[in-house]
Amino acid sequence: MTEEPFEGWYTDPYGRHEARWMSDGKPTRLVRDGRLTSVDEPEGPALHTPEPIEHPEASSGDDLLRADADQAEVFDQEKATRAVFDVWDIYGPRQ
């Protein structure tokens, strides 16, 4: 049985941050300190072997953000309904 490569949040092997995201067994530039996520290039010698970090509060996914979250519009039901009727006015019912 082969072990799967590291994937997820692990202790930072470089010792600069609380956690570093590992992908396919390699450290990435995505790091975390508390609830703050930022980037830091994975450079230099590793000081220790990364250990997995459990984040029980992340199990619901409510700490995850889309990369374009700062550009996303808040869903507006009234605006969406108007858009549907605008399309109806242009194209009418399908025959």
Image: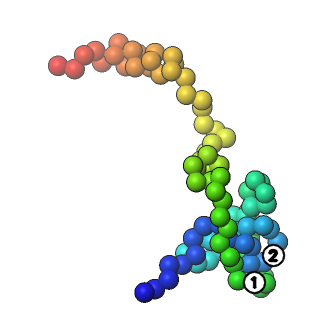
Residue 58 lies, in percent from the top left, at: 62, 53
Lateral position of residue 3 relative to residue 88, left or right:
right
Q: Tell me which corner region of the image, top left, top right, bottom left or bottom right, holds residue 87.
A: top left
- The residue that disc 2 covers is 15
Residue placed at 74% from the left, 61% from the top? 32
Lateral position of residue 32 relative to residue 73, left or right:
right
Residue placed at 79% from the left, 60% from the top? 33
Q: Where is the N terminus found, in terms of image quarters? A: bottom left
Residue placed at 65% from the left, 52% from the top? 57
Q: Secondary structure at mark 2?
A: loop
Please indicate, yes or no, whether residue 90 appears anywhere in the rendered image. no
Q: Residue furthest right?
A: 16
Please indicate, yes or no, whether residue 86 appears anywhere in the rendered image. yes
- Front residue of 93 and 81: 81
Lateral position of residue 85 relative to residue 6, left or right:
left
- The residue that disc 1 covers is 48
Nearer the N terminus, badge 2 or badge 1?
Answer: 2
Q: Residue furthest left?
A: 95
Residue 12 lies, in percent from the top left, at: 74, 73
Residue 76 lies, in percent from the top left, at: 55, 23
On residue 21, which mark appears? Answer: none
Distance of mark 2 from mark 1, alpha carbons? 8 Å
Dot 2: few (<14), some (14–19), or many (≥20) neighbours within 10 Å?
A: few
Q: Secondary structure at mark 1?
A: loop
- Front residue of 56 and 19: 56
Identity, as a three-letter code, of the amino acid under mark 1: His
Identity, as a three-letter code, of the amino acid under mark 2: Gly
Residue 44 lies, in percent from the top left, at: 78, 82
Dot 1: few (<14), some (14–19), or many (≥20) neighbours within 10 Å?
A: few
Q: Are marks 2 and 1 in contact (CB under 8 Å)?
A: yes
Q: Tell me which corner region of the image, top left, top right, bottom left or bottom right, holds residue 9.
A: bottom right
